[in-house]
Image: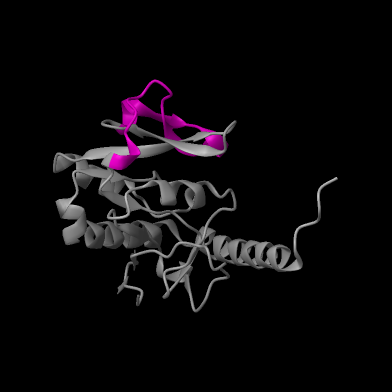
């Protein structure tokens, strides 16, 4: 018999779940035309970042449900000759495996929970080669903390990536809250880019 989780940990999970439910409800309600326009502004702002311009290998996620359209940034990255790495869920190990994607139509298919993922036979990308990371999430705050989808996949992946690789999130403005629940060990982001601003957390 295992010990029950500490009350603090249980409370943190419940707080994150509540934030997740509220923000997803609001994000899902965005009209498609507003989501498309905001996505273009987010992608343009990210593409103009010097750290993105300097990166040779970028780790991107592909859009799922009502997320902003990261395919716009994928197109820019490929046009600039960058290697684009995309995660694939290894459910047995509860880890993300990283593969190169050159063509969205040929190299990607719905995977875990319907999330677009590289085919299993795609070319692996070494974690140490990644220069720049687009970090997904549901909610963020100005201190750089994030609430993800609850699986912990990026919490396990991010410490394994090069420390010098910037961790950047793209998000709709409605996803940025005054404060999101977090634990002391949670890794903060280097910047959060929305359709209206760039948030650089104080260090």
5 sits to left or right of 91: right
Spot the residue most to the right.
1
82 sits to left or right of 39: left
Placement of the N terminus among the 4 image quadrants? top right
- In front here: 101 or 21? 101
- Residue 169 lies, with reference to residue 108, above or below; the image says below
Res. 114 in view: yes
Placement of the C terminus among the 4 image quadrants? bottom left
185 sits to left or right of 203: right
How many callouts does the rendering have?
Answer: 0
Residue at image location 27% in from the left, 39% down from the top: 84
Residue at image location 36% in from the left, 60% down from the top: 170
Residue at image location 34% in from the left, 28% down from the top: 124
137 in magenta: no
Q: Horizontal and vertical percent for residue 13? A: 67, 62
> Which of the 4 image quadrants contains residue 37?
bottom left
Q: Horizontal and vertical percent for residue 201? A: 36, 74
Residue at image location 53% in from the left, 58% down from the top: 28
Q: Horizontal and vertical percent for residue 29? A: 53, 62
- Residue 110 lies, with reference to residue 57, above or below; the image says above
Which colour assignment does the render follow?
Answer: one colour
Q: Horizontal and vertical percent for residue 202? A: 35, 77
- Residue 188 lies, with reference to residue 87, above or below; the image says below
Magenta span of residues: 104-128
- In front here: 36 or 164? 164
Res. 48 in view: no
> Which of the 4 image quadrants contains residue 77?
top left
- In front here: 12 or 80? 12
């Amino acid at each position: 018999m295992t010990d029950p989780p500490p009350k603090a940990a249980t409370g943190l999970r419940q707080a994150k779940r509540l934030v997740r439910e509220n923000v997803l409800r609001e994000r899902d309600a965005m009209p498609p035309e507003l989501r498309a326009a905001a996505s273009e502004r987010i992608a343009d702002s990210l593409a103009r970042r010097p750290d993105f311009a300097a990166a040779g290998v970028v780790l991107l996620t592909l859009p799922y449900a009502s997320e902003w359209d990261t395919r716009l940034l994928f197109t820019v990255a490929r046009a600039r000759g960058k290697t684009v790495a995309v995660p694939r869920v290894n459910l047995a190990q509860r880890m993300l495996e990283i593969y190169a994607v050159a063509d969205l139509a040929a190299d990607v298919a719905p995977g875990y929970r319907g999330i677009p993922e590289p085919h299993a036979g795609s070319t692996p990308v070494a974690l140490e080669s990644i220069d720049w990371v687009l970090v997904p999430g549901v909610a963020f705050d100005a201190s750089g903390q994030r609430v993800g989808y609850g699986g912990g996949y990026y919490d396990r992946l991010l410490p394994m990536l090069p420390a010098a690789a910037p961790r950047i999130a793209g998000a709709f403005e409605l996803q940025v809250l005054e404060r999101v629940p977090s634990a002391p060990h949670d890794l903060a982001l280097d910047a959060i880019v929305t359709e209206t601003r760039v948030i650089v957390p104080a260090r």
